[in-house]
Amino acid sequence: MKKVWCVITSENIYANVQVEESPILINYDLNNDSCWKPFLTKSLRDKYFHGDTKITDARVQPGAPEKI
């Protein structure tokens, strides 16, 4: 892996807004708004995932590796 533009968790998708994209130089504190911006707001999560439901259905493209 050479660059990290986003991180996907069971609760949200976070966009890397840091200058650095190299995995070794990135701050991985997903709660730090100066480093990561959540893609889904609380209202969108509540609307589409009914509050406590977590994002679990990741579609894998044919031929993609099972693990990264």
Image: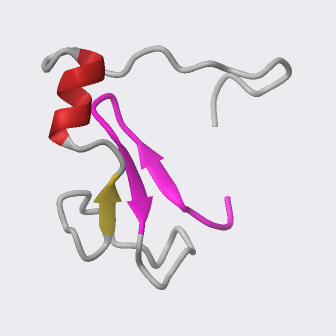
State left or right for residue 63 relative to residue 13. right
| Residue 32 image-quadrant placement | bottom left
Which residue, as the protein is rendered here, is positioned at the far bottom?
Answer: 19
Residue 9 placement (x, y as % from top left): 36, 36
State left or right for residue 51 relative to residue 25. left
Residue 68 placement (x, y as % from top left): 64, 37
The correct choice, above or below, for 40 with respect to 63 in the image is below
The correct choice, above or below, for 32 with respect to 41 in the image is below
Span shown in magenta: 1-16
| Residue 42 image-quadrant placement | top left
Looking at the picture, tell me which residue is in the foreground, 48 or 26: 48
Q: What residue appears at the point 50 percent right and 73 percent down from the top-left corner?
A: 24
Q: What residue appears at the point 17 percent right and 35 percent down from the top-left corner?
A: 43
Q: What residue appears at the point 78 percent right and 27 percent down from the top-left corner?
A: 64
Which residue, as the protein is rendered here, is positioned at the far right?
Answer: 63
Q: Quadrant of the N terminus?
A: bottom right
Q: What residue appears at the point 33 percent right and 72 percent down from the top-left corner?
A: 27
The correct choice, above or below, for 59 with respect to 19 in the image is above
